[in-house]
Image (cartoon, helix red, strand yellow):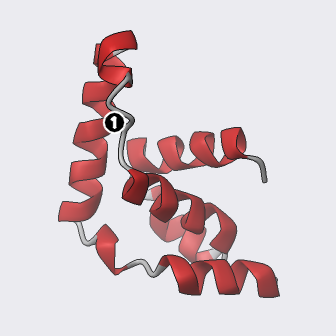
Amino acid sequence: MNAREEELIARELLASPDLVAVYWHRKQWAALAALARFARRDVPVELAQTDPALYRTLREQITRFFLRGGDVLSLEKLEALARRG
């Protein structure tokens, strides 16, 4: 999966948090790892200048992700599970 595909998946999961459970049950580890990676990197500050509405939306979604317990997702474990298969 390339960087753009990862970003699109992460944005989809941030916009629809209920999908995280669906991806978990389907064992879509690579997608969940993309979400964890995207959330940890946070929103690029430059986006506030180029697209303020998108910046605010992503900031709110990432904040909600962490408030809902998203920080318990271990990026390292998800990446290992994705490599296995």
Q: Is residue 17 left or right of residue 19?
A: left
Quadrant location of residue 51? top left
Q: Where is residue 52 in the image (x, y as percent from the top left)?
A: 29, 15
Query: As drawn, which residue projects farthest toward the left?
Result: 67
Quadrant location of residue 48? top left
Q: Nearer the viewer, residue 10 or 43?
A: 43
Task: In the rendered view, tell whether residue 75 sits above or below residue 31.
Answer: below
Secondary element at tag 1: helix
Task: In the rendered view, tell whether residue 57 sits above or below residue 33.
Answer: above
Q: Position of residue 41 (x, y in %)?
A: 41, 53
Per the image, the residue denoted by label 1 is 58
Residue sitting at x 58%, y 43%:
7
Q: Position of residue 80 (x, y in %)?
A: 67, 86
Q: Is residue 85 left or right of residue 48?
A: right
Q: Which of 4 and 19 is in front in this view?
A: 4
Check the picture and name the quadrant holding the C terminus.
Answer: bottom right
Res 28 visible:
no
Task: In the rendered view, tell whether residue 34 sits above or below residue 7.
Answer: below
Q: Nearer the viewer, residue 39 or 70?
A: 39
Residue sitting at x 78%, y 81%:
83
Residue sitting at x 18%, y 62%:
67
Query: As drawn, which residue projects farthest toward the front?
Result: 46
Q: Position of residue 10 (x, y in %)?
A: 52, 49
Task: In the rendered view, tell whether residue 60 sits above or below residue 30.
Answer: above
Q: Is disc 1 surrounded by few (<14), some (14 to 19) or many (20+) residues within 10 Å?
A: many
Amino acid beneath label 1 = Leu
Residue sitting at x 32%, y 26%:
55
